[in-house]
Image (tube, rainbow, N blue to C red):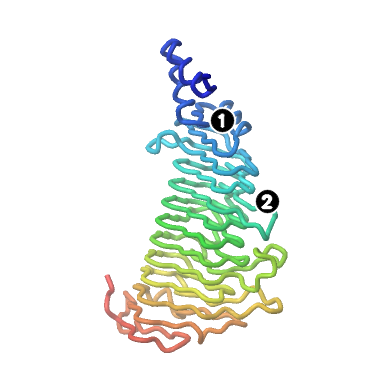
Amino acid sequence: MVTSALIHLIVPLMTPLGSLFVLGICLTGNSVIVHDNEELRKAVRDLKPGDAIKIAPGEYAGGLHIEGLKDVTIEGLDPKNPPHLQGGANALHASRCENLTLRHLRISGQTGNGLNLDDGGNFDKPVTGLLIEDVAISDVGPKGNHDGIKCSGLDRLTIRDCKLKGWGGQGIDMVGCHDSRVTGCRFEGKNGFSASAAVQTKGGSSRITIERCIFLRAGERPLNIGGSTGLTLFRPSGAKYEAKDIVVKNCTIEGSSCAAAFVGVDGAEFVDNTILYPEKWIFRILQETNADGFPPCRNVLIQSNKIVFRRSQVNVEINVGGGTEPKSFRFVQNRWFAEDKPAASKPNLTSVEQNGVYGQNPR
């Protein structure tokens, strides 16, 4: 007895050379190559769990939507010449799509968010295993709360080797995300775009690592560790912290009003980073969620960072807001250098630093 899979394998071999494209699809299994908008939209409508869409180089319209799918891949066919998804409220809205992979794509010109990835409003059942890799996102917004990548209720999310330039709200906004990683990404602000942050972790987010990233004038708060979230939007429901156990390491942050803001966070590490020329403060310690049961912003380790600043710009190193515990912040072995006034390099910190180095150029 000949199976249907074998029939699919044999028939194209007996047809003209042009039918070999069909053979390629059958051999890869639930994978389709698309070349224009019509083909892309049909492929998206026909997606089933385990399928892959490979998008040929070219221009495509945004506004795609998928929901409730598992193990799906949408990627550019040629990583060196990625397809360009232009416009739409979102380039792609993916709701409750576990183990989704998006890679080798270029996205721009959305009025809502570049990518919108969420749990479909099922706050206590996070979506797991998403990978966003080698995606370039630009010109989203330009003004208002419009994010490059909006992530809500996602666990074990990886965002790797992506580039974001020009957005209205946050480059990457994580609301109630856990056990996730942002690695090797580049964030660059752009004139005319009202960027508030490059990476924000809030709404009950925990165990997030941000590493080996570059931030160039990337919003008012390039790193907003914590934030301000409506109480009905926390994931899991009832979480009593904006963010917890957040790690920022081996990053370079240049420009912006500050390098990082810690906002209602209950435990974080900021280690082995390079800070260059913040424009007003170096760090901010803030509390924006003051509901019952929420602890003050506290328990942050700031260690082994290289910090180069100018006294003509920075008079107050740490901006401390009310309702926080600034003395719980620990400073260890940081190198502080006021480039325009080396003798005035030693900062006024919220606790006594251990083994800090002051006035020596760390570069």
Rendering coords of residue 92 (x, y %): 59, 42
Per the image, label 2 sits on a secondary structure element best described as loop
Does 191 sit left or right of 277 as displayed?
A: right
Closer to the camera in the image, 266 or 333: 266
Q: Residues within 10 Å of mark 2 (few under 14, many from 20)?
A: some
Where is residue 287 shown, x and y percent of the image? 61, 76
Instruction: Tell me which label, 2 or 1, sits earlier in the chain.
Output: 1
Q: Residue at x 58, y 55 (%)?
A: 151
- Labelled disc at residue 120: 2
**Residue at the (49%, 25%) spot, across then down:** 26
Residue 239 in which image quadrant: bottom right
Q: Residue at x 32, y 79 (%)?
A: 341
Furthest residue in direction bottom, as rendered: 352
What separation in Å lies between label 2 and label 1 (alpha carbons)? 23 Å
In the image shown, does 291 or 246 lie closer to the viewer? 246
Q: Residue at x 46, y 58 (%)?
A: 182
Identified by mark 2, the residue type is: Gly
Residue assigned mark 1: 40
The image shows residue 24 at horizontal and vertical percentages of 44, 25
> Which quadrant, please, contains the C terminus?
bottom left
Q: Secondary structure at mark 1?
A: helix
